[in-house]
Amino acid sequence: MSTLPLPPFASRSERLRTSTIRELLKLTETLGILSLAGGLPSPESFPLDDLRREADRLFGEFGPSVVQYSVTDGVPALRDWLAETASHNFGRAIDPNTDVLVTHGSQQGLDLIGKLFVDEGDVVVLEDPGYLGMIQAFDLYGPRFEGVTGDVDGMRTDDLAARLGAGLRPKLVYVVANFHNPTGATMSVVRRQELAALAEQYGF
């Protein structure tokens, strides 16, 4: 009995790599290792009593629907609350049905951004060093990464401006503005404003 060959994998599968984050997390399971690489909080800091109490309250209020599948863009009540909070914070109306999408963590959000915006060969600028999870999420879509140096105030927008002036044309510029991973830096207000102005000027 002959067997047919498997269909070929998609060409983008050649860019698949082992997850660096997954490999780091494996180390945390090793006895005797206190890993500072994965950004894991101390288990002793978890508010277990508060979590138990809140879980009981939610089951009492909503019943089994708490653990049931829901719509893919997030539980409507949560989207309503997020939209209301954001509307208050930003001083403009946020529509929970068109402006809010709840993801299952940052990696899903980054993957969706990559799917929407990144074509093979597009330039994606990131702070150097950059967040490994973002690099892995975007890498599948074949961009060309360009690093821009940072310091205690975040990405050096003067360096970015100079490179843009010299012809660099990114599709996206990715920053972790608060408590950057891995440096821990928080971007200053001035640099946030400069980055927004550059985005407006150069269309990224």
Image: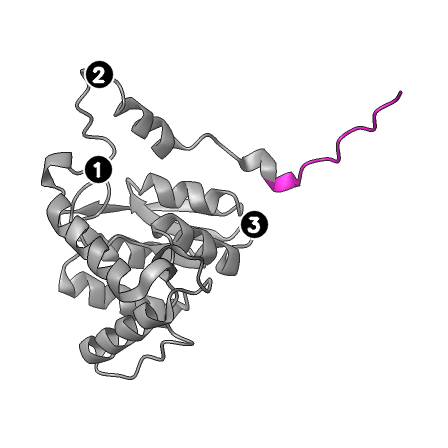
- Residue on which the image places disc 3: 120
Quadrant (top left, top right, bottom left, bottom right) of the N terminus: top right
Picture residue at 14% right of the left edge, 64% below the top: 189
Which amino acid type corresponds to the residue marked 3 in the rendered image? Glu
Horizontal and vertical percent for residue 181? 24, 43
Label placed on residue 39: 1
Q: Is residue 138 visible?
A: yes
Q: For mark 3, does the 10 Å Cα neighbourhood hold few (<14), some (14 to 19), or many (20 or more) residues?
A: few
Q: For mark 1, does the 10 Å Cα neighbourhood hold few (<14), some (14 to 19), or many (20 or more) residues?
A: few
Q: CA distance from mark 1 to mark 3?
A: 31 Å
Residue 6 lies in the magenta stretch? yes
Looking at the rendered image, the disc whose residue lies closer to the viewer, 1 or 2, is 2
Of mark 1 and mark 3, the one earlier in the sequence is 1
Q: Which residues are magenta?
A: 1-12
Picture residue at 18% right of the left edge, 15% below the top: 32
Label placed on residue 124: none
Against 95, residue 62 (above or below) is above
